[in-house]
Image: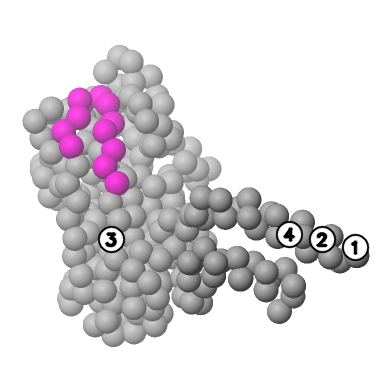
Amino acid sequence: MTRWTAAAAAAIACLGLAAPAGAATVVLYDQDFETPNDPPDFDNGAGSGYRDLSQQQVNDLYGSQPAGFTFAQDWTVETMLLTGTQAFGTGYSDPSGIGGDYAVGMLSNVQNDLLGLSFDAGAFPFFNFRLDVSSMGLDGPGGPFTNASLVPKFRFTLYDNPTGATGLFGNGTVLDTADLTGTASAIDTTDWTSGQFAFDLSNATNGKVTLQIDLLEGGYAIFDNFRITASDEQGGGLDPVPLPAGLPLLLAGLGAIALLRRRG
């Protein structure tokens, strides 16, 4: 151990912090939906009758992100342009900016929209998942499908998928499940709710799993900012671990001391 790392370890110990235990985490999927594939370009309402919305398959716009990845999609899981100007005459509004330019939406009624994502979590004990959800209306035929009294409720179900097949919505053994309820917002304005889940993989056959996403209630709602990890820890890898207040300054000072010692 060098003088610097020894000093840093001693400083961490003095602050009452545990040294890293070597917990492992692998990022399986990280998608904010901000970079649709080109081609095809995002079609802003073209041919669909819905303004600021594309009814292209999600796989057309985000398949192979990362390379080789594919969604399973049923019915009209589609991509919404939050920064467009067509919907409701002024476009959608995202006051917090959490959604960026694009988000993905689905219906809870009219038809049963589903999205499936398959992964190999290996021998890790936890499948961790985070996202943001919001209610939202649609400006187009039959819309808006939601109103200020409808609250979106999503269900996330993790299925065992021992064959590793892609293109599945999930079937067979359920490993874990969780619901996330958002808030009722104006039909043209986002009000994001964040969810974070640690799903138990202890009953998985070989670590190969499928995550199914289903909007149970709310008419129409959107989601964004997926991050999915396999980890030794519950929630591992979903958020950066913050340094305690004062630690960066202390470590910088130790680095300066180490530099002076080398020069001496």
Distance Cα–Cα, label 2 vs label 1: 6 Å
**Disc 2, disc 1: CB below 8 Å?**
yes
Identify residue for label 4: 255
Q: Earlier in the sequence, mark 3 or mark 4?
A: 3
Relative horizontal placement of residue 225, taking residue 179 as reference (left or right): right
Nearest-to-viewer mark from 3 and 2: 2
Tell me residue 42's x, y (percent): 44, 36
Q: Is residue 222 above or below residue 114?
A: above
Residue occupied by mark 1: 263
Whether residue 54 is visible to the viewer of this picture, yes or no, is no
- Amino acid type of disc 3? Phe
Q: Position of residue 204 (x, y in %)?
A: 27, 81
| The C terminus, quarter of image | bottom right
Q: Secondary structure under badge 4?
A: helix
Residue interval drawn in magenta? 183-194
Residue located 52% across and 72% down the image: 19
